[in-house]
Image (cartoon, rainbow, N blue to C red):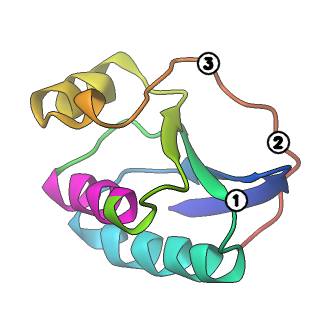
Amino acid sequence: MTIVHTVQGNRILVAVHGDLDLQTASPLREALDELLDRYRDKGLVLDLSEVNFIDSSGLGVILGRYKRMAGRGLSLTGVKPNVRTVLELAGITAIIPVSDARPSTKDQHV
């Protein structure tokens, strides 16, 4: 898994490349928490356009960041249909904005 981020205005854009599963959940959580600590006043947009699979571990990372972001804003973009289905079944689409459009970013590695 690769994680790439950029800061645009009042949000952190994070592009995730690879599966979100038990093996990758911990490194993603750590990287996101580092960014959230560094940019305490910014919202978070996760670009999942390069994610083909997500399991309960990946869902846990997203939900944990949602709770941590209280009031700052979290959204998901670039979500593929199969990943959207998992997000819908888990109820995440009811609490976190999800779009299929991919944001434009200038890549910066975490």
Instruction: Residue 15: give x, y in percent of width and height.
Output: 63, 49
Look at label 3 and name its amino acid.
Answer: Ala
Instruction: Residue 40: give x, y in percent of width and height.
Output: 65, 74
Q: Nearer the viewer, residue 38 or 26?
A: 38
Query: On residue 101, which mark appears?
Result: 3
Instruction: Identify which residue is drawn at 15% across, 33% down.
Output: 91
Look at label 2 and name its amino acid.
Answer: Thr
Query: What secondary structure is found at the residue carrying circle 1?
Result: strand
Query: What secondary structure is found at the residue carrying circle 2?
Result: loop
Instruction: Residue 108: give x, y in percent of width and height.
Output: 83, 63
Is residue 101 left or right of 33 when viewed as pictured? right
Point out the tag, 2 or 1, that comes first from the N-terminus.
1
Which-is-in-front pick, marks 3 and 1?
Answer: 3
Point out the tag, 3 or 1, that comes first from the N-terminus.
1
Look at label 1 and name its amino acid.
Answer: Val
As displayed, is residue 33 above or below residue 48? below
The answer to whether residue 44 is magenta is: no
Query: What secondary structure is found at the residue carrying circle 3?
Result: loop
Cα separation between marks 3 and 2: 13 Å
Question: Which image quadrant is residue 77 in?
Answer: top right
Task: Identify residue for label 2.
Answer: 105
Task: Identify residue for label 1.
Answer: 4
